[in-house]
Amino acid sequence: MKAEKVFVMTAFSKLHTFLHPALSALLLLGSLAVGAADAGPAASEGEAMAAVPAPLLDTYWKLVQLGDGPHVSAYDNQPEPHLVLETGSGRFHGAGGCNRLRGNYSLDGRWLRFSDVGGTRMACVQGMRREQLLLATLAQVSSYAVQGQKLVLSDAEGRALLRLEAVYLR
């Protein structure tokens, strides 16, 4: 029995010695082939998300452009201008850059209207003028288009009034 055990172990050792380099080479070639087949640029998480349209409702839409004006950013110690349209309630909330905003919206296909817009009444040195322009512009919105992670709110003639971008909190 002892001789049989030694023979099996010796045979296994020789087989292992022979197969080990061959298996290593085979695995290396296989991994290179798989790597070459997938040599295209890897999509980043942002690129993958950009390909899928963000939902209009319950998304944090950060204002990035008001009319044809420059890129919008938040002022120090003030909330960034944004909107969130709540599902099922017909209500929205957000910030104008100085004050918190709230109001109603109605949605019918691609048509979108804002009404009863109000908010807090803090006075801010920076941001008040832009916020007043934002409030006046919301009253002119009549349609929307979601393009990937971007939302464009337009007037009845199809002119882009507001450009917003989806923001995901992690």
Image: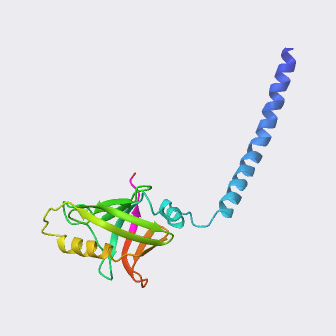
In the picture as drawn, the residue positioned furthest to the top comes out as 1
The reply to whether residue 42 is visible in this rendering is: yes
In the picture as drawn, the residue positioned furthest to the bottom comes out as 157
Closest to the observer, 130 or 117: 117
**Quadrant assignment, res 35:** bottom right
Report the side of 44 relative to 94 (left or right): right
Q: Could you tell me residue 138's position as x and y percent?
A: 32, 72
Report the side of 74 relative to 17 (left or right): left
Relative height, residue 116 to residue 11 (above, below) = below
Residue 120 part of the magenta-drawn span: no
Relative height, residue 125 to residue 20 (above, below) = below
Q: Could you tell me residue 125's position as x and y percent?
A: 12, 69
Report the side of 113 relative to 34 (left or right): left
Q: Which residues are magenta?
A: 165-169
Q: Could you tell me residue 18's position as x and y percent?
A: 79, 41
Relative height, residue 156 to residue 108 (above, below) = below
Closest to the observer, 22 or 45: 45
Residue at point 44% right, 70% down? 150
**Quadrant assignment, res 127:** bottom left
Q: In which quadrant is the N terminus drawn?
A: top right
Residue at point 42% right, 85% down? 157
Residue at point 77% right, 38% down? 17
Q: Could you tell me residue 38's position as x and y percent?
A: 65, 62
Closest to the observer, 152 or 110: 110
Residue 167 part of the magenta-drawn span: yes
The reply to whether residue 81 is visible in this rendering is: no
**Colour scheme in use:** rainbow
* Total labels drawn: 0
Report the side of 155 relative to 70 (left or right): right
Q: Give the main secondary structure, helix, strand or loop, of the magenta stretch.
A: strand
Residue at point 51% right, 65% down? 53
